[in-house]
């Protein structure tokens, strides 16, 4: 089976490789999902497939499952976030179990929003400066003596 996974991978059939690898070995599936470097969307899709498998296969205590799922997020090198894997959990899972990870995600989004606000403020300031420069150009003039050569030849 490992040989089939390798062949699928060599043929760039990554989804099939990960699906088959999940039947053989979780670590092999993770390695296959991580191999895709040039297509971020496909890589995320593969990691989601692995995440779903991890969450569905865990039969232990709910809190252990959640802990393992959160640990799994760190293995994806920030490719997946908590909101990506929440749909894979049963509806009756308490949100308290995800409190830390949700707070971390919200802090990340807040810092991204603050960065975007700063970029917008900078762009607005730049636009105001350009408008001011254009207004100043409209008021600019030069006095030319009637005897002075203006540089335009006819």
Image (tube, rainbow, N blue to C red):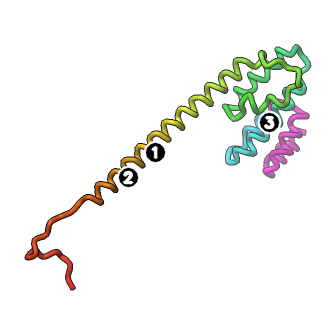
> Would you name the residue on which mark 2 appears?
131
Number of marks in picture: 3
As drawn, is 122 to the left or to the right of 149? right
Disc 1/disc 2 C-alpha distance (Å): 12 Å
Work out whether mark 3 precedes mark 2 in sequence or the reverse, and give the earlier one: 3
Task: Identify the disc placed on residue 123.
Answer: 1
Q: CA distance from mark 3 to mark 1?
A: 37 Å
Residue sitting nearer the eye, 135 or 151: 135
Number of the front mark, 1 or 2: 2
Residue at left offset 70%, top offset 18%? 100
User: Principal SS element in the magenta part?
Assistant: helix
Q: Which residue is mark 3?
A: 48
Q: Position of residue 19 (x, y in %)?
A: 87, 40
Tell whether position 59 is magenta. no
Circle 2 sits in a helix, a strand or a loop, which is it?
Answer: helix
Kind of element beneath mark 3: helix
Q: Nearer the viewer, mark 3 or mark 2?
A: 2
Q: Is residue 70 above or below residue 134?
A: above
- Magenta span of residues: 1-29
């Amino acid at each position: 089976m490992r040989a089939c996974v390798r062949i699928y991978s060599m043929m760039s059939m990554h989804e099939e490789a990960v699906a088959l690898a999940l039947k053989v070995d979780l670590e092999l599936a993770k390695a296959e999902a991580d191999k895709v470097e040039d297509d971020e969307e496909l890589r995320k899709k593969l990691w989601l497939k692995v995440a779903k498998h991890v969450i569905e296969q865990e039969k232990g205590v709910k809190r252990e499952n959640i802990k393992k799922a959160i640990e799994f997020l760190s293995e994806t090198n920030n490719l997946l976030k908590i909101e990506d894997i929440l749909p894979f959990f049963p509806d009756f899972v308490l949100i308290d179990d995800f409190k830390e990870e949700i707070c971390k995600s919200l802090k990340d989004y807040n810092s991204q929003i603050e960065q975007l606000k700063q970029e917008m403020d900078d762009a607005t300031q730049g636009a105001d400066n350009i408008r001011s420069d254009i207004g100043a150009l409209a008021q600019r003039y030069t006095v030319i003596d009637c005897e002075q050569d203006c540089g335009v030849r006819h």
